[in-house]
């Protein structure tokens, strides 16, 4: 996890959590998204970039890390938000309840951001960018579906498109998708 913050003379105006993409298995590193921090920091909003275990075998600290399932990734990010919540509560004490916390992500990170919409830490908007919101078609593919270890029931359960309602009470959840189809007139 990378935390971008300025030495606050006062509490931040918000906290923005960003989750990288890469089809849950890509070589994308959270450092590649450091650019998102600049303008937010100028507006006194702290930025946290989260990295997660990937569904393909990878190496960390010289050791092979086995594939992880989609369920494990979602749980891992829930645990990350729990830890961030403790960190922010310890850092900002009683004023934490007045600081909005936003979550966003790109592509696979957009999917994961949408899955975290009901976490108690998230008090601001949930903003997935080009997320994958329906995992059922993905689960049927050989390359990605097998790597994610998804059966149809799990794919349905972990598809944000099937789990919209609870977050509607306390935060804005924006799903922006664009589908391009051949021979389709708009």
Image (cartoon, rainbow, N blue to C red):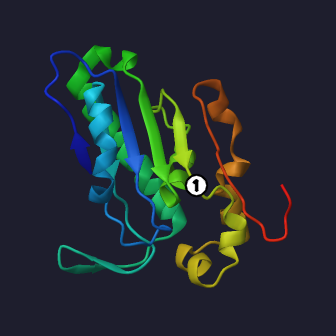
Residue at horizontal 61 percent and vertical 76 percent from the top? 145
Q: Is residue 121 visible?
A: no
- Closest to the observer, 177 or 100: 177
Q: Which residue lies under the disc numbered 1?
A: 131
Relative horizontal placement of residue 135, taking residue 109 as reference (left or right): right
Relative horizontal placement of residue 150, taking residue 112 as reference (left or right): right
Label 1: how many Cα within 10 Å (few below 14, some 14–19, many 20+): many
Residue at horizontal 58 percent and vertical 55 percent from the top? 131
Relative horizontal placement of residue 113, taking residue 157 as reference (left or right): left
- Considering only vertical position in the picture, is 49 above or below 31? above
Quick one: SS at disc 1?
loop
- Closest to the observer, 24 or 95: 24
Residue at horizontal 18 percent and vertical 73 percent from the top? 61
- Considering only vertical position in the picture, is 18 above or below 74? above
Residue 32, quarter of the rendered image? bottom left
Q: In which quarter of the image is the C terminus?
A: bottom right
Q: Is residue 150 visible?
A: yes
């Amino acid at each position: 996890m990378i935390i971008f913050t300025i030495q606050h003379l006062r509490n931040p105006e918000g906290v923005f959590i960003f989750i990288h993409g890469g089809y849950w298995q890509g070589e994308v590193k959270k450092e590649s998204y450091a650019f998102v921090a600049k303008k937010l920091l100028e507006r006194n909003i702290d930025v946290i970039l989260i990295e997660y275990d990937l569904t393909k075998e990878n190496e960390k600290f010289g050791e092979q890390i086995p594939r992880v399932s989609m369920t494990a990734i979602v749980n891992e990010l829930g645990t990350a938000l729990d830890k961030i919540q403790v960190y922010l509560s310890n850092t900002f004490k009683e004023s934490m309840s007045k600081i909005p916390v936003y979550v966003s992500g790109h592509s696979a990170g957009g999917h994961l951001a949408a899955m975290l919409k009901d976490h108690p830490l998230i008090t601001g908007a949930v903003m997935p960018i080009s997320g994958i919101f329906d995992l059922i078609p993905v689960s049927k593919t050989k390359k990605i579906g097998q790597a994610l270890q998804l059966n149809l029931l799990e794919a349905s359960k972990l598809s944000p498109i099937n789990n919209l309602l609870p977050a509607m009470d306390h935060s804005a959840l924006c799903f922006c998708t664009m589908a391009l189809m051949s021979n389709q007139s708009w």
